Amino acid sequence: MSFVPARDGRKNRSAANRAPAVPDRIEDLHGSSLGFLEVPHHMACGHASRRRYDLDDPVQLRHAYEQVLCEAAGCGEVEDLINPEMLRRVWRDLHLPSRVREAWETRHPTLRRTVNRTTPGTRTTGSGRGPATTGFARRGRVRVLKAGVRIEAGRAGT
């Protein structure tokens, strides 16, 4: 796919084509942790109400941070919009492209996600394949016979 040259002859510098904006220090971030966050128009097109996020709502907070981290044109925007404590709190829950996550975790190793989030002594799933999660769990198949007796897959019926 060809690029669309800008009027001055430069290549299109969309967020998908440029390196993520990652400040040198997390302590340089000074965004608000209270109230509302309104992202610039180039990060989210549309009416101002579509660009305004309530930081008290965890879903809106994560969505706003995902947009800022993926779409910011420079480190100054990231520093103005992101709060360091809030970023550390929601980092594991953010759905980021791998190149953005790797850039941030390379520059700031304290954000790096652990492979196994469980602590010693936690229970595992019955299959022994991994840690038990609080989210969706895959259930075994259940067969219902005509008599109304349920038989779980892999177990003998009684």
Image: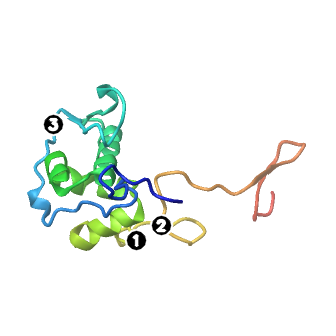
Tags 3 and 2 touching, CB below 8 Å: no
Residue, disc 2:
131
Task: Give the Cα distance between marks 1 and 2.
Answer: 8 Å
Binning the other alpha carbons within 10 Å of mark 1 as few (below 14), some (14 to 19) or many (20 upward) gives: few
Across and down, in percent, residue 2 comes to 50, 59
Which mark's residue is nearer the viewer, 3 or 1?
3
Q: Is residue 2 above or below residue 44?
A: below
Amino acid carrying mark 2 in the image? Pro
At 41% from the left and 65% from the top, the residue drawn is: 98
At 54% from the left and 60% from the top, the residue drawn is: 1
Amino acid carrying mark 3 in the image? Leu
Which numbered tag is attached to residue 1? none
Amino acid carrying mark 1 in the image? Asn
Residue, disc 1:
116
Residue, disc 3:
34
- The answer to which of 74 and 146 lies nearer the viewer is 74
- Which callout, 3 or 2, points at the residue further toward the start of the chain? 3
Tags 3 and 1 touching, CB below 8 Å: no
Q: Is residue 135 above or below residue 119?
A: above
Q: Could you say whether the residue bearing mark 2 is in a helix, strand or loop?
A: loop
